[in-house]
Amino acid sequence: MQAAAAFNRAAVTARPLRRPPRPPLLHIAEAEYGPGGRRGAPLTPLRCAGSLSVGAGGYGNERVPVFPRQQSWDPYKLLGVDHDASEEEVRSARNFLLKQYAGYEESEEAIEGAYDKIIMNSYSHRKHSKMNLKSKIKKQVEESPSWVKALLGYFEVPSLEIISRRLAFFGFIAGWSIATSAESGPAFQLALSLVSCIYFLNDKMKNLVRASTTGLGVFVGGWILGSLLVPAIPAFIIPPTWSIELLTSLSAYVFMFLGCTYLK
């Protein structure tokens, strides 16, 4: 018995110790180098990088404000101005809103569209107003008595360029007369203005006799009316260097300008 027990203790002592299993090489490599095979590369989980920006129509963290009135059908309400606002006020409101909501394409388009509608409506209104004024004047002339129609038949409205040139010419003659009134009378200037008036009338009438008669009649009528009006002017209004002849000449210049410009 003692021999059998000694034999069993010797067998247990001689049995080899079992070691724990070694980890596979792949696990060791991943632990040391990471999944990509790079030493020390951290395991980074996937992330969703895109973030929606409300109203911006794109990506990024910046939030662009949305124009709250962009769906309004009234362009004046959209820009926040009254219906009787001037073009300068409408333009200022447009520029302010474009600066405030810059970067949002739909808001910018809505603001620009409202501004264009208001400007076009204003232009159309002015155009129709001018047409209505001309129509009213034409209607009044057609409904006027025959003698008024006959009188108006002697007058015409030339182009703005012709009016400006005639006004500049007679204005120069008047200034020349005032500048030389202390030295001599405006006799030369009166003669020059009369010849010019006849020349302008002949350019329209194509009849020198008729143009000369009309120009002389306009000159005499202006001189007579000036002679009647000048004494009625208060003395404190007239500069002391201006004589009665000069004032009468200025009245004649006005009549000759009107005659050679608006008479047919």
Image (cartoon, rainbow, N blue to C red):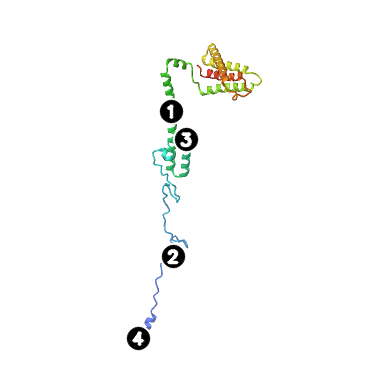
SS of the residue at dot 4? Answer: helix
Using the rendered view, name the quadrant where residue 149 is placed: top left
Residue depicted at x 43% and y 30%: 125
Q: Residue at x 61, y 19 (%)?
A: 244
Q: Amino acid at mark 4?
A: Ala
Q: In the image, is residue 147 above or below residue 87?
A: above
Report, in whole angstroms, how far the alpha carbon at label 2 lies from the one at label 1: 88 Å
Q: CA distance from mark 3 to mark 1?
A: 17 Å
Which residue is outermost to the top?
209
Q: Look at mark 4 in the image and give the residue it sits on.
A: 5
Amino acid tagged 1 = Ser
Q: Position of residue 5 (x, y in %)?
A: 35, 86
Assess whether mark 4 and mark 1 are in contact (beta carbons under 8 angstroms). Answer: no
Which residue was labeled with disc 2?
Answer: 31
Q: CA distance from mark 2 to mark 4?
A: 49 Å
Q: Which mark is residue 129?
A: 1
Q: Nearer the viewer, residue 101 or 146?
A: 146
CA neighbours of label 2 inside 10 A, class few (<14), some (14 to 19), many (20+): some
Identify which amino acid the numbered label 3 is placed on.
Answer: Glu
Q: Name above or below for residue 35 compared with residue 95.
A: below
